[in-house]
Amino acid sequence: MTKTYALIEMIGVTKEYFGVPAIKQVDFNVEAGEIHALVGENGARISTLTKIIPGAATPTRRVMRIKGREETLRNPSEALRDGIAMVFQETSLVPSMTVAQNLYLGHERLFNRLRGLNIAAQQFLQSLNFNVDPAATVANLGAAQKQMVEIARAVLQKAGLIIFDEPTADLTPEEKRYFFARVQRLKVSGVAIVFTSHAVEEAPEIADRITILRDGELVVTDRAAKCDGDSIIRAMVDRTLSGELYARRDRKVRDAIDKMLSVRFETS
Ligand SMILES: Nc1ncnc2c1ncn2[C@@H]1O[C@H](COP(=O)(O)OP(=O)(O)O)[C@@H](O)[C@H]1O
Ligand SMILES: [Mg+2]
C-alpha cells in the first residue's frame, strides 16, 4: 500500500520578533484538494502563519514537508516552483501593466505581439469564466477583478495550492459569493486552497477543515462540518474563560460598591 502524504505539513512553527514569540509551536497541514480556513481574531497571527508557508515570512523554527519530502521554501518564487501560489492582501500585481501583461509576467518575449498576448489572455480568462478585460490597466480595476487576475495567474502557473490572505476583506457581499463559487470550482479542478478570515460565518460555509489560532497559538484544527459560528467564536476568544473572569471581576466590583455604600450609609 502506498502511503499518502499531506500536500503541506508544517510542524512546530515558531516565529519570534526580537525574542518575543508571535507564533508558538503551531502544527498546520493542508491536504491535497481541500479548502482549509485559518481563522482568528484580529492580531491572532493568521496572516503571518500563511505567509510562512511560501516563505514570504521567515519562521524562527519549523519543520516543513511537501508531499512527505522535507523542504524549506525561502521565498514565493521558490514556492511557485513547487506549485504553491500566494495571493496577498496587498496585491502583488504590477499596477501600470495590463491584465494580460500581468498574467504573462516572466514571459516578456510574448509582449512583442500585443494582439496575440491579449487573445491568449482573453481565452484563458474566459475558460475560467472571469469577466476581466485583458487590455485593461490593473491600476483601474476594482478589488474583485484584481483578485480574479491573481487567481488566473496562479492557475496559469499550475499551482496545486493557492493561499489567500483575507481574500474577502475588500469585497462586497455579492463579490464574496462569487469568490467562494470560484474557490469551489478551483477545488473541483483539484487545487487546494488555504484562506484566512476574521469573519466567523465564512469558514463553515465553504471550508472542509478549519484551523483556529488565538494569540499565535493553535486552538484546534477540525472538520468544518463539526464547527459553527458559535463554537468558532468561543475558540477564537475563549469566551467561556473570559466569561468567568468577568463574572469574578463583577463580583469584586459588586463587593467594592457594597462596601462603599455601607460606609456612606454609616457616615451619613
Ligand atoms: N515585523 C513585525 N515586527 C513585530 N511584530 C510584528 C511584525 N509583524 C507582525 N507582528 C505582530 O503580529 C501581530 C499581527 O500579526 P498578523 O499575522 O498580521 O495578525 P492577523 O492577520 O491575525 O490579524 C501584530 O499586531 C504584531 O504584534
Ligand atoms: Mg491579517
Image: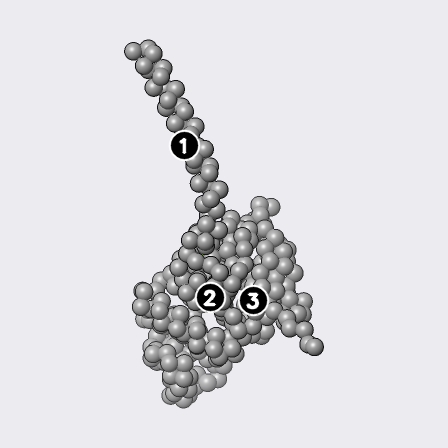
The reply to whether residue 22 is visible in this rendering is: yes
Disc 1 packing (10 Å; few <14; some 14–19; many ≥20) = few
Q: Which residue is farthest left?
A: 268
Disc 1 secondary structure class: helix
Q: Which residue is disc 3 drawn over? A: 30
- The percent coordinates of residue 42 (x first, y second) are 44, 51
Q: Are marks 2 and 3 in contact (CB under 8 Å)?
A: no
Which mark's residue is nearer the viewer, 2 or 3?
Answer: 2
Ranked by sequence position, the earlier of labels 3 and 1 is: 3
Disc 3 packing (10 Å; few <14; some 14–19; many ≥20) = many
In the foreground, 234 or 170: 234
- Quarter of the picture containing the C terminus is top left
| Residue drawn 59% across the image and 70% down it | 7
Q: Which residue is disc 2 drawn over? A: 207
Disc 3 secondary structure class: strand
The three-letter code of the residue at mark 1 reads Asp
The three-letter code of the residue at mark 3 reads Val
Q: Which residue is disc 1 drawn over? A: 250
- The percent coordinates of residue 39 (x first, y second) are 47, 57
Disc 2 packing (10 Å; few <14; some 14–19; many ≥20) = many
- The percent coordinates of residue 218 (x first, y second) are 55, 53
Disc 2 secondary structure class: loop
Ranked by sequence position, the earlier of labels 2 and 1 is: 2
Q: Which residue is farthest top?
A: 267
| Residue drawn 66% across the image and 70% down it | 68
Q: CA distance from mark 2 to mark 3?
A: 12 Å
Q: Which mark is residue 5?
A: none
Q: CA distance from mark 3 to mark 1?
A: 43 Å
